Image (cartoon, rainbow, N blue to C red):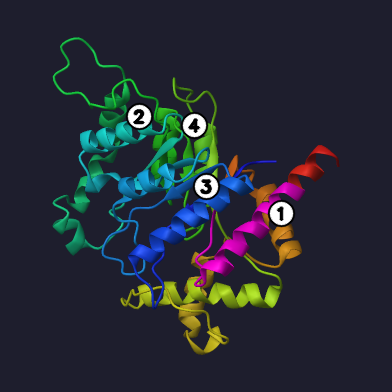
Amino acid sequence: MIPFSVLDLAPVTEGSDAGQAFRNTLDLARLAEQSGYRRYWLAEHHNMPGIASAATAVLIGYVAGGTSTIRVGAGGIMLPNHAPLQVAEQFGTLASLYPGRIDLGLGRAPGTDQATAKALRRYFDSADAFPHDVLELLGYFEPAKPGQQVRAVPGAGIDVPVWLLGSSLFSAKLSAQLGLPFAFASHFAPDAMDEALALYRRDFRPSARLSQPYAMLGLNVVAADSDAEARRLFTTQQQSFIKLRRGMPGLIPPPIDDIESFWTPVEKLGVERALACAVVGAADTVRNGIEAFVARHRPDELLITANVFDHVARRRSFEIAAAVHQDMAARSEHP
């Protein structure tokens, strides 16, 4: 059975604050470690009141320091916001502190709006330089050469697995050319998923970092003790998407009983399309949904996310998903 991993945005819920979000993140990471998830990734966003993972490398250090064995990483670092040398130094530091446990996923979007990208002193048009920046960053992880003027300290010669992230064909193509693992953002932008996967697998060139293609897909999984309760919990994420598209991002809202009264028919269609890769329900529903998703798309790994308002309910969702994974693994060994 393929591995399951976790994507967390350190959500800040209504009535809470960033400090509590970080404590919840560490608690969830410890649960993920105990439950057999392979990796725990955090994503860079800026100027988003409901997402506290802006200083992604700092938060990765906090999570890695509070866990023991689970891989911890970025899903991802938005490279247009950063100088490649600084990213290499940050992740070289993390990998020195927590050897064999740090992942670096790279995205080419700014993870924010234009005004905030400008405030970061890097500009969105620098995304055009993304392939060059990736190559520069990969170079800093190579052993330093005699006479090399600029090196990452720490970073040079340190094994940091680098992934490319994407929601289009661009990063799928680049991942294939560079021989890197690829993670597709199907949990919020699934339209190009099938084409991107096919392109990546067809054009993959083996590299010193990876001998064969390895693709991870994002999947929303909201699980509860009943289908009805899971659907209610999922309204938190549906509301968040609508508010973002209305230009009113805010703290993560509590679930509501009647989502139909919240959105317009056009908004509903847009959200259902964006969140088409979602499995919502009790354990049996979740197992059937994940099995169907895996059978259709054949990912090498699933990156599971769940934007659930109540932390106890969010823990429960990941516990159910882990139990489903264990059951699927057992049945694959003894069909």
User: Which badge, 4 or 1, comes first in the chain's sequence?
Assistant: 4
User: Which badge, 1 or 2, comes first in the chain's sequence?
Assistant: 2
What residue type is disc 2 on? Ser
As measured in the structure, the alpha-carbon distance from the residue carrying label 3 to the one carrying label 4 is 12 Å
Q: Main secondary structure of the magenta part?
A: helix
Residue numbers of the magenta segment: 302-327
170 left or right of 260 in image? left
Give percent across and percent down for residue 49: 31, 69
Where residue 23 sits, quadrant-wise, is bottom left
Where residue 177 sits, quadrant-wise, is top left
Establish if 263 lies above or below 238: below
Furthest residue in direction bottom, as rendered: 261
Count neighbours of disc 4 (C-alpha within 10 A) and say few if under 14, some if 14 to 19, many if 20 or more.
some
Q: Please name whichever residue, 241 or 315, is drawn nearer the observer in this view of the structure.
A: 315
The N terminus sits in image quarter: top right
Q: Please name whichever residue, 222 or 279, is drawn nearer the observer in this view of the structure.
A: 222
Q: Which residue is mark 1?
A: 324
Q: Which residue is mark 4?
A: 203
Secondary structure beneath dot 2 equals: helix
Q: Is residue 303 visible?
A: no
Give percent across and percent down for residue 37: 59, 46
